C-alpha cells in the first residue's frame, strides 16, 4: 500500500536494488553450498595422498630389494603388488574427489538457476518494456500529437478512480479537444511512467 504512494521512478530504483541484492544473495548461497559439499572431498584427498605416499615408498623399497643378489627379483614381487594396491587406493580417492566436485557444482548451479531464470524471464522483460514505454513517452510528451496519444493511453489504461479525479466530464472534455483536459490526461500517463509532465503550452 505504501509502495503505491512512491513515485514510479523511485519504485523502479528500489526494485532494481532489491533484485540485485536478491540475485547476489542466491549466488552467495550457491557458493556456500558448493564450498560445503566440497568439504566431503577431504577424505578422498587424504586417501589419494596416503595411497600415493605408500605406493612411492613401496616402489623405493622394491627397488632396493631388487638389488639383492640371486633372490632380488623374487623378493620384489610382493612389494610391487602392494604398491599397485596402494595406487588403486589413490585412484579411488581421486574418483571420490571428482564425484564430490561434480555434485558440488551441480547443486550450486541448481540453487542459482531458478532465481536467475526468474530475473531473466520475468523481471527483465517487464523492466525493458517499461523502459521502452518511458522512452517513447519522453520523446513525444512535448509534441501536440504526442500529448493526444498519451491522453488517449491514459483514458484507455488508467483506473477509473484516477480519471474521475480529473473531473467527471474528463472523457467528454478530451473528445472536445480541451487542451487542459488533454494535458491533464497526458500528465497522468507520464506520472505512471515516472516522467515529468510536458511543458505547458
Image: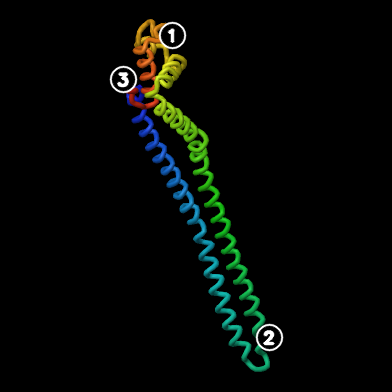
Q: Do the residues labelled 3 and 2 touch (CB within 8 Å)?
A: no
Q: How far apart are marks 3 and 2 (CA)?
A: 106 Å
Give the image location of residue 49, x and y in percent: 52, 69
25 to the left or right of 52 = left
Q: Is mark 2 on a helix, strand or loop?
A: helix
Which circle's residue, 3 or 1, is located before the other in the chain? Answer: 1
In-image side of 143 versus 106 (left or right): left
Secondary structure category for the residue under label 1: helix
The C terminus, quarter of image = top left
Question: x, y percentage for residue 72?
Answer: 65, 89
Q: Residues within 10 Å of mark 3 (few under 14, many from 20)?
A: few
Residue 173 vs residue 26, the one in the foreground: 173
Question: What residue would you read off at disc 1?
Answer: 175
Numbered disc 3: secondary structure: loop
Residue pointed to by mark 2: 74
Quadrant of the frame with the N terminus: top left
Give the quarter of the image for residue 196.
top left
Query: Which of disc 2 and disc 3 is earlier in sequence?
Result: 2
| Mark positioned earlier in the residue sequence (2 or 1) | 2
- For this view, does 10 lie left or right of residue 125? left
The label on residue 200 is: 3
Residue at 31% of width from left, 20% of height from top? 200
Amino acid at each position: 500500500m505504501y509502495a503505491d504512494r512512491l513515485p514510479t521512478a523511485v519504485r523502479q530504483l528500489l526494485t532494481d536494488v532489491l533484485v540485485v541484492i536478491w540475485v547476489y544473495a542466491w549466488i552467495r548461497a550457491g557458493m556456500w553450498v558448493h564450498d560445503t559439499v566440497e568439504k566431503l572431498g577431504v577424505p578422498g584427498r587424504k586417501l589419494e595422498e596416503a595411497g600415493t605416499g605408500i605406493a612411492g615408498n613401496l616402489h623405493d623399497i622394491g627397488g632396493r630389494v631388487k638389488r639383492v643378489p640371486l633372490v632380488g627379483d623374487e623378493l620384489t614381487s610382493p612389494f610391487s603388488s602392494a604398491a599397485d594396491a596402494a595406487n588403486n587406493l589413490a585412484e579411488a580417492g581421486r574418483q571420490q574427489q571428482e564425484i564430490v566436485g561434480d555434485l558440488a557444482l551441480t547443486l550450486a548451479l541448481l540453487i542459482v538457476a531458478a532465481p536467475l531464470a526468474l530475473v531473466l524471464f520475468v523481471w527483465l522483460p517487464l523492466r525493458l518494456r517499461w523502459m521502452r514505454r518511458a522512452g517513447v513517452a519522453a520523446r513525444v510528451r512535448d509534441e501536440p500529437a504526442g500529448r493526444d496519444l498519451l491522453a488517449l493511453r491514459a483514458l484507455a489504461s488508467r483506473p477509473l478512480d484516477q480519471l474521475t479525479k480529473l473531473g467527471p466530464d474528463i472523457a467528454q472534455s478530451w473528445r472536445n479537444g480541451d487542451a487542459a483536459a488533454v494535458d491533464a490526461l497526458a500528465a497522468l500517463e507520464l506520472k505512471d511512467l515516472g516522467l515529468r509532465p510536458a511543458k505547458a503550452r
